[in-house]
């Protein structure tokens, strides 16, 4: 697609208030592929005003009418699927088949799920002598990261639209073209002017202005825990609703009764997909000491097979950061059995699929979110030990448990301090609530729980 040189505000592409621009880089070859405007507080203010002006009309649109527009949005995403995949590949670097299946495919599922939910959700219920109405929270400030550029946008915008909220989006500076394409799709879907607005720009400038704006009723943020804490504090001071989807360091717990080869193979693939840039990735693999050496050999083999099929990291900074973590792992005594800190290609921000053995729970690579294709194998002695290790980080976003039967895996999963657990390789469910325990966040996305984030209740007593 061709980049827009303005902001999508009030249903049209408007010139930015300032003249600064952001360079969009293809991380596979380090070439500049486009420029987009870097928004300022002035652009954010114009967008919030447009969203506020559109709120009464959209909030009063009956749920069936909102559902029809979300369904139309889904249809445009389907029609432009190829373009979406190509755009994500160009600015994020994901291999094209992954962009087609996941980066374009999942947002279509999620948008479709909210078209259905908008039509079927109980926005009104009787409780004794009361009628309780679920009303839109108001104007939403959405701030999204680059790792799943379209999914992160749709996981906020689709439920916000279904709820009757209006939105200002500040997408990640690394992936603004996908956001512009999404704004085009919103326009094509006939969503009324001002209901959705886009301001591209830098986090500490446009993002911060949006989080601090008085005209925003709910800030929905996905990204790093460090920035999330800041946004939570700002929102708290203003008594504003806030939803935070933050980092993770999820555990993949392989119990002795599990199919070890399958659990290790799926576990490695889970981390390598999207080059390890997945907040819910199972970056710690916990294996019983009796099976540890076999698991290490299987994981090294699985990572080596991945080889060239992995995409680059998003930018030079993440490239340096992830390689720094790998060096830190070696320095702290972990044993490299696949990959390593050396860049495998001269051009592009590539990192080899990396596997660490002999990782102990307190090592940096076992505690901090690396956000790269790095998996750490940690040994446990018994189930209580495994649970202590699994729960022994500040995060609690996701995880996996493998066992000989589902009941055994479920019993362990129920003791994990985490928001989502895949049982014996369970499939992604776009209706299941997604979000973190502990410092992985506040609030839930997807399905009816994700819709509820954008609603507030009003009770009338009779
Ligand atoms: P980030 O800095 O937290 O960025 C997330 C979003 O917040 C981006 O749109 C960013 O803008 C914006 N932002 C940055 N500073 C802000 C501020 N002071 N006020 C308001 N908004 C602000 O995360 P990142 O730099 O993309 O990635 C760094 C780390 O975050 C990763 O290594 C990973 O640990 C974590 N992460 C987690 C997730 C997740 O889904 N949980 C996703 C991506 C990253 P810019 O794009 O201009 O920075
Ligand atoms: Mg950043």
Image: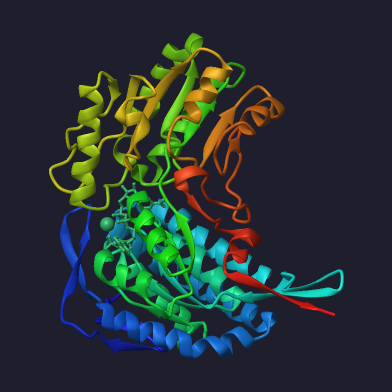
Residue farthest along the top direction in this orientation: 290
Q: Residue at x 33, y 79 (%)?
A: 44
Q: Residue at x 44, y 63 (%)?
A: 236
Q: Position of residue 153 (x, y in %)?
A: 44, 66
Depth order, front residue of 379/134: 134
- Whether residue 445 is visible, yes or no, is yes
Residue farthest along the left direction in this orientation: 346
Above/below status of 39 relative to 175: below
Quadrant containing ligand 2: bottom left
Question: Quarter holding the C terminus?
Answer: bottom right
- Whether residue 192 is visible, yes or no, is no
Above/below status of 278 relative to 288: below
* Residue 188 left/right relative to 68: left
Q: Residue at x 37, y 76 (%)?
A: 213
Q: Position of residue 111 (x, y in %)?
A: 56, 67
- Answer with the quarter of the image where residue 127 lies: bottom right
Depth order, front residue of 291/459: 459
Q: Position of residue 438 (x, y in %)?
A: 49, 43
Could you tell me how many numbered marks the image carries? Answer: 0
Question: Quarter holding the N terminus?
Answer: bottom left
Q: How is the image coloured?
A: rainbow
* Residue 388 left/right relative to 48: right
Above/below status of 349 relative to 450: above
Q: Residue at x 18, y 50 (%)?
A: 316
Q: Position of residue 221 (x, y in %)?
A: 42, 61
Above/below status of 399 relative to 441: above
């Amino acid at each position: 697609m061709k980049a827009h040189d303005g902001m999508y505000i009030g249903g049209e592409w408007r010139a930015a208030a300032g003249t600064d621009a952001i360079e969009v880089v293809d991380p596979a070859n380090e070439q500049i592929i486009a420029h987009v405007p870097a928004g300022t507080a002035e652009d954010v203010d114009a967008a919030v005003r447009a969203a506020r002006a559109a709120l009464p009309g959209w909030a009063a649109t009956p749920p069936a009418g909102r559902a029809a527009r979300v369904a139309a949005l889904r249809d445009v995403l389907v029609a432009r699927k190829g373009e979406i995949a190509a755009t994500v590949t160009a600015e994020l670097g994901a291999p094209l088949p992954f962009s087609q299946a996941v980066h374009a495919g999942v947002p279509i599922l999620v948008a479709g799920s909210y078209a259905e939910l908008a039509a079927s959700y109980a926005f009104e219920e009787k409780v004794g002598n009361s009628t309780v109405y679920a009303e839109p929270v108001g104007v939403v400030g959405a701030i999204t990261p680059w790792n799943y550029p379209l999914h992160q946008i749709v996981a906020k915008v689709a439920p916000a639209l279904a709820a009757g909220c209006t939105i200002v989006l500040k997408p990640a500076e690394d992936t603004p073209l996908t956001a512009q394409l999404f704004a085009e799709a919103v326009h094509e879907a006939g969503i009324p002017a001002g209901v959705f607005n886009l301001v591209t720009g830098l986090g500490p400038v446009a993002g911060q202005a949006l989080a601090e704006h008085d005209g925003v009723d709910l800030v929905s943020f996905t990204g790093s825990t460090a920035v999330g804490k800041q946004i939570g504090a700002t929102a708290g001071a203003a008594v504003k609703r806030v939803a935070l989807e933050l980092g993770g360091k999820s555990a993949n717990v392989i119990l002795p009764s599990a199919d070890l080869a399958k659990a290790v193979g799926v576990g490695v693939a889970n981390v390598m997909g999207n080059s390890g840039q997945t907040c819910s990735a199972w970056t710690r693999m916990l294996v019983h000491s009796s099976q540890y050496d076999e698991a290490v050999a299987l994981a090294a083999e699985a990572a080596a097979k991945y080889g060239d099929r992995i995409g680059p990291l998003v930018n030079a900074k993440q490239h340096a950061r992830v390689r720094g973590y790998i060096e830190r792992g070696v320095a702290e005594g972990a044993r490299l059995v696949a990959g390593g800190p050396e860049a495998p290609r001269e051009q592009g921000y590539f990192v080899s699929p990396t596997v660490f053995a002999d990782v102990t729970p307190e090592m940096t690579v076992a505690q901090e979110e690396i956000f790269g294709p790095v998996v750490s194998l940690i040994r446990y002695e018994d189930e209580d030990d495994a649970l202590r290790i699994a729960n022994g980080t500040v995060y609690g976003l996701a995880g996996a448990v493998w066992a000989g039967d589902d009941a055994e895996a479920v019993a362990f999963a129920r003791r994990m301090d985490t928001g989502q657990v895949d049982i014996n390789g369970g499939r992604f469910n776009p209706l299941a609530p997604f979000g973190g325990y502990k410092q992985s966040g506040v609030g839930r996305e997807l399905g009816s729980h994700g819709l509820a984030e954008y609603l507030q209740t009003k009770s009338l007593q009779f």
